[in-house]
Image (cartoon, helix red, strand yellow):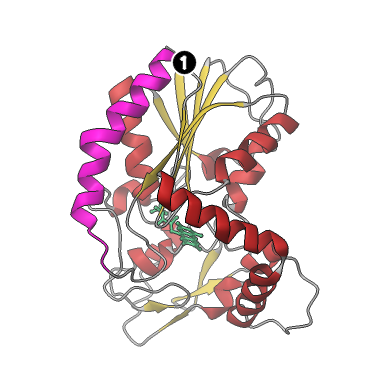
Amino acid sequence: MNLEIYYFSGTGNSLTVAKDIAEKMGGDLISIPSVMDKKSITTDSDVIGIVFPVYYLGTVNIPLVVQRFVMKLDGISTKYIFAVCTFGGGAGSTLTILDEQLKKRGGQLASGFGVQMPQNAFRKPFENKTKLYSNWKDKKLDFICEHVKAKDGWFDTDGLFIGLVVAIIERMMKVGFLNRSSLRSMKKTARLQEDSDLKLDEVIHFMDRSYSTDENCTGCGTCSKVCQVRNIEIVDNKPVWQHHCENCLACIKWCPQSAIHGYGELPGGYHHPDVNILDMLRESD
Ligand SMILES: Cc1cc2nc3c(=O)[nH]c(=O)nc-3n(C[C@H](O)[C@H](O)[C@H](O)COP(=O)(O)O)c2cc1C
């Protein structure tokens, strides 16, 4: 099987998933941001995997850079495409949305899976990280590989109970109330006027306005090197965010001095234990 796995990851959960599948199935691992300078993305592989984290369930769902990547895919009508989304709470309709986007490019999602991983955007009470890691390694990894090998049409995201709760939340989002309040709070974080007419996905790019450094920043530039979308310039030994942020939290979580603060900050800085800083450096550098 000719397999290419494209991934996007801020704190290593999705990278671990992508890496483990690629190793087990003998596929090539390709970072999504590393191919984004191409006008169109084509491949000779007959199987394509797309692995990414769920962001803002019920509103955005798929990281913006992943959405832009899908819109660049060409010649995918005969490909077997599978996706794995990692999430802290639930995947909801994320894979349905991805399927709709792939259809616009002439393809479709053949199979899709959700993998629960530690929540990287906030401290989640009662979260058992060890259990989540072993659930991935001991159960889900083999399960996904078997389905991809069989090239079948399996979809498996949230369990029944979580699925129901998440569906209700997403429904409420669609009705508008939660959507409006989450847009309001994101504008606040992005230091935008409440009456600014930016849409939710445009607001995300400005979330970096809430990022700052403290006196422990040494100007080492790690933040700039792990920012997959080149959103950080180092000026006078300090990071300056360029407002095309994906809000993936990599700069915060991988700062060796824990000197960056902002949205979603978890003291100590979460990252998946199987991933190290070298894995996170931009491929093109
Ligand atoms: C900006 C942002 C928004 C997120 N929104 C959600 C969400 O709506 N639902 C959810 O289950 N997890 C959410 N998460 C958690 C991530 O999906 C989860 O921790 C994921 O495994 C992180 O993957 P990564 O380490 O590859 O970046 C969010 C994380 C971030 C950074």
Q: Is residue 83 left or right of residue 37?
A: left
Whether residue 73 is situated above or below residue 283 in the rendered picture: above
| Residue 73 counted in the magenta span | no
For the N terminus, the quadrant is: top left
In the structure shown, which secondary structural element does the residue marked by tag 1 occupy? loop
Which residue range is magenta in the image?
126-151
- Residue indicated by mark 1: 151
| Residue 145 counted in the magenta span | yes
Q: Is residue 16 left or right of residue 202?
A: left
> Residue 199 in the image: x percent, y percent?
75, 66
Q: Can residue 274 be seen in the rendering of this structure?
A: no
> Residue 268 in the image: x percent, y percent?
26, 73
Residue occupying the point 28% across, 74% down: 257
Residue 188, located in which quarter of the rendered image? bottom right
Prevailing secondary structure of the magenta residues: helix
**Count of numbered marks:** 1
Three-letter residue code for mark 1 = Lys
Residue occupying the point 30% across, 54% down: 277
- Mark 1: few/some/many CA within 10 Å (<14, 14-19, 20+): some
Whether residue 6 is situated above or below residue 203 in the rendered picture: above
Outermost residue toward the bottom in this view: 215
Whether residue 93 is situated above or below residue 129 in the rendered picture: above
